[in-house]
Amino acid sequence: MPPVARADLVAVFRDMMTAIDDDGDGRLSLAEWREATVGGGSRAGRAIPIRLSLRGSAESVFRELDGDGDQVLSFAEFAREPLANFDCLDADNDGIVQPAEGEARTTRCASVEATSPAR
């Protein structure tokens, strides 16, 4: 595994969110989330990583990710889980996960993975 920068991960998730944000308001509605994760619409399949990681229905995962209950996902809510995992892996807090940090994840990050809403 090559080193991974947090800034690069943020950029990937911003691009992913932009790709499925049909109305361009910077938030994801349940309809946008459902189309991206379940499919059937013009943007279906653009969020394949989300679809592959879902545990449960699109609606139940959306509700779990919607931390403030406002019926839309902000970027912070959308990227919370992967960024929390990154932060857990980044043992020296330098914003870059090195291969050795990634290999040691099982001992440091079990609690983050266990409490993840999409698992």
Image: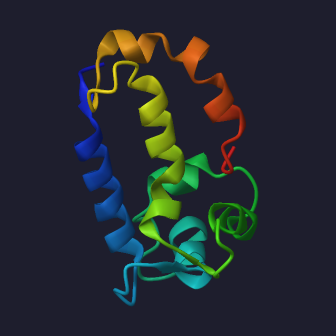
- Quarter of the image for residue 26 reads bottom left
Above or below residue 7? Residue 20 is below
Position in image of residue 88 (x %, y %):
48, 28
Position in image of residue 51 (x %, y %):
56, 56
5 vs 33, nearest the viewer: 5
Above or below residue 20? Residue 107 is above
For the C terminus, give its image quadrant: top right
Above or below residue 25? Residue 82 is above
- Quarter of the image for residue 65 reads bottom right
Which color scheme is applied?
rainbow
Position in image of residue 20 (x %, y %):
41, 74
85 vs 16, nearest the viewer: 85
For the N terminus, give its image quadrant: top left
The residue most toward the front is 93
33 vs 113, nearest the viewer: 113
Residue plotted at (42% across, 34% down): 86
Residue plotted at (61% across, 68% down): 38
Residue plotted at (39% across, 14% down): 101
Q: In this image, 8 relative to 41: left or right?
A: left
Residue plotted at (71% across, 33% down): 114
90 vs 100, nearest the viewer: 90
Q: In this image, 40 relative to 45: left or right?
A: right
The residue most toward the bottom is 23
Position in image of residue 47 (x %, y %):
44, 61
Tell me how many marks there are: 0
Q: In this image, 2 relative to 74: left or right?
A: left
